[in-house]
C-alpha cells in the first residue's frame, strides 16, 4: 500500500474549493527559510485536507451511507473529520483517548459529531472505532494510515512547490506518518523530506531500526497529536521509496521552538506542529549553505494562554 503523486493530484482536484490554500511565508531575507502556515487551514490543522478527500471519495463510491463515518483521534483528525462531515452532511462519530485535550473535544462536539472517550491511548480508541464500524456500517476514516487521508495531506506540498519551486527541503513532524507519506509522494524527485519526531514518540526511528513498523511507548508534550504508537504502513512505504532525513527532538526543544515561533513570528503553534521547527531551532538539523528549507507548521489547536511567557 503506497501513496503516489497521482493520488495527491487527484486529491487536490477533489478538495479544491473545500480547503484553504495556506500561505508560504519567507522568514529570511536570503530565502533560506520558509514557513508553510498550514495552521491557518480550516480547523487549524492540515488534517482537514485528508478529511475532505476521504469523505468526498467515500461519497463518490457509495462507501459512505446514512451510517456516516467513524474515526479515532487524539484530537486533530477528529476535528477535521467532524468539520468535513458537517460541511458534507455526513454523520460523524469520533473516538478519542480519555486524555484528549478538552479544547479539541469541545470543538469536535461543536461541529456536530458524537464524541466517545475510550482508553488511555490512540491505539485503544482506534480499536473501539473499528469495532463500531463493523457493528454499524459506518465507514472507517483512519487518522493517518489511509490512502485518501494521506493523499489529501500531501496536497499542501503540491501548493508549497508550486508557490516556490526552488525549495530544496521540506521539514515535517511525524507521528503516525500520514502527513509525511503524502508530502513524500508529492515531493518525490523534487525535494528532500526531513521527518522530525519527539524522542518520546519515536515511531519512525523504531520502524527504521526494525525494518518494519513496530509498537512503541509514547508520551510527552506532543503526544496528543504525534502519539500514535505505531508508524503507518503508508509512511513506511514512503521510507522504502526514498529514505528521508530522520531527526529526533526533545520535549524541551519542542517547547523552546513553540515559544520561538510565537516570540519571533507570532505563529501560535501547538506542540506537535512546533516539533518540525524544533529540528532547526535546536540545531539538530543544520541546512547546507544555500539550502532552501520550508518548515510545515501543521497545527494551532492549543491553549492560547500558554503561548505567552510567564
Image: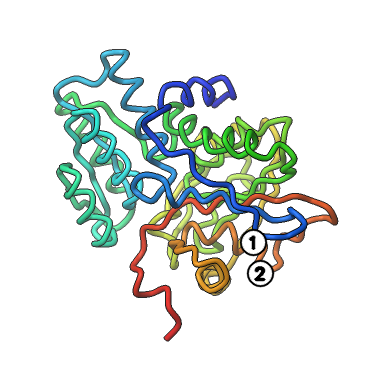
Residue 98 % position (x, y): 23, 58
Tag 1 near tag 2, CB within 8 Å: yes
Q: Is residue 19 above or below residue 170?
A: above
Residue 253 % position (x, y): 58, 71
Residue furthest to the top: 61
Q: Which residue is mark 1?
A: 279
Residue furthest to the right: 289
Q: Secondary structure at mark 2?
A: loop
Q: Secondary structure at mark 1?
A: helix
Q: Is residue 299 above or below residue 271?
A: above
Residue 276 % position (x, y): 58, 57
Q: Which residue is mark 2?
A: 282
Quarter of the image for residue 310 reads bottom left
- Labelled disc at residue 111: none
Residue drawn at x 71%, y 36% is 165
Residue drawn at x 57%, y 19% is 6
> Mark 1 to mark 2: distance in Å?
6 Å
Left or right? Give the position of 6 relative to 41: right
Quarter of the image for residue 158 reads top right
- Classify mark 2: residues with Cα within 10 Å, few (<14), some (14-19) or many (20+): some
Q: Is residue 51 visible in the rendered structure shown here?
A: yes
- Classify mark 1: residues with Cα within 10 Å, few (<14), some (14-19) or many (20+): many
Residue furthest to the bottom: 310
Amino acid at each position: 500500500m503506497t501513496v503516489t503523486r497521482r493520488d495527491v493530484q487527484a486529491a487536490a482536484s477533489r478538495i479544491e474549493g473545500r480547503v484553504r490554500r495556506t500561505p508560504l511565508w519567507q522568514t529570511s531575507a536570503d530565502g533560506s527559510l520558509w514557513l508553510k502556515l498550514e495552521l491557518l487551514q480550516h480547523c487549524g490543522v492540515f488534517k482537514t485536507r485528508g478529511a475532505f478527500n476521504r469523505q468526498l471519495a467515500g461519497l463518490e463510491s457509495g462507501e459512505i451511507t446514512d451510517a456516516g463515518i467513524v474515526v479515532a483521534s487524539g484530537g486533530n483528525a477528529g476535528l477535521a473529520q467532524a468539520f468535513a462531515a458537517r460541511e458534507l452532511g455526513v454523520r460523524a462519530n469520533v473516538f478519542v483517548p480519555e486524555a484528549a485535550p478538552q479544547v479539541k473535544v469541545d470543538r469536535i462536539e461543536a461541529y456536530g459529531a458524537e464524541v466517545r472517550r475510550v482508553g488511555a491511548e490512540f491505539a485503544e480508541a482506534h480499536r473501539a472505532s473499528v469495532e463500531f464500524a463493523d457493528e454499524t456500517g459506518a465507514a472507517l476514516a483512519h487518522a493517518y494510515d489511509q490512502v485518501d487521508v494521506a493523499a489529501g495531506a500531501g496536497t499542501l506540498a503540491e501548493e508549497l512547490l508550486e508557490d516556490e519551486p526552488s525549495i530544496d527541503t521540506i521539514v515535517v513532524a511525524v507521528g503516525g506518518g500520514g502527513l509525511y507519506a503524502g508530502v513524500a509522494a508529492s515531493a518525490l524527485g523534487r525535494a528532500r523530506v526531513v521527518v522530525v519526531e519527539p524522542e518520546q514518540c519515536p515511531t519512525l526511528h523504531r520502524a527504521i531500526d526494525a525494518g518494519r513498523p513496530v509498537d512503541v511507548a509514547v508520551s510527552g508534550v506532543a503526544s496528543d497529536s504525534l502519539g500514535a504508537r505505531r508508524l503507518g504502513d503508508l509512511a513506511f512505504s514512503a521510507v522504502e521509496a526514498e529514505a528521508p532525513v530522520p531527526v529526533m527532538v526533545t520535549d524541551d526543544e519542542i517547547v523552546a521552538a513553540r515559544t520561538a515561533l510565537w516570540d519571533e513570528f507570532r505563529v501560535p503553534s501547538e506542540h506537535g506542529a512546533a516539533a518540525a521547527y524544533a529540528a532547526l531551532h535546536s540545531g539538530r538539523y543544520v541546512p547546507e549553505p544555500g539550502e532552501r528549507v520550508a518548515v510545515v507548521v501543521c497545527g494551532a489547536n492549543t491553549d492560547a494562554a500558554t503561548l505567552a511567557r510567564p
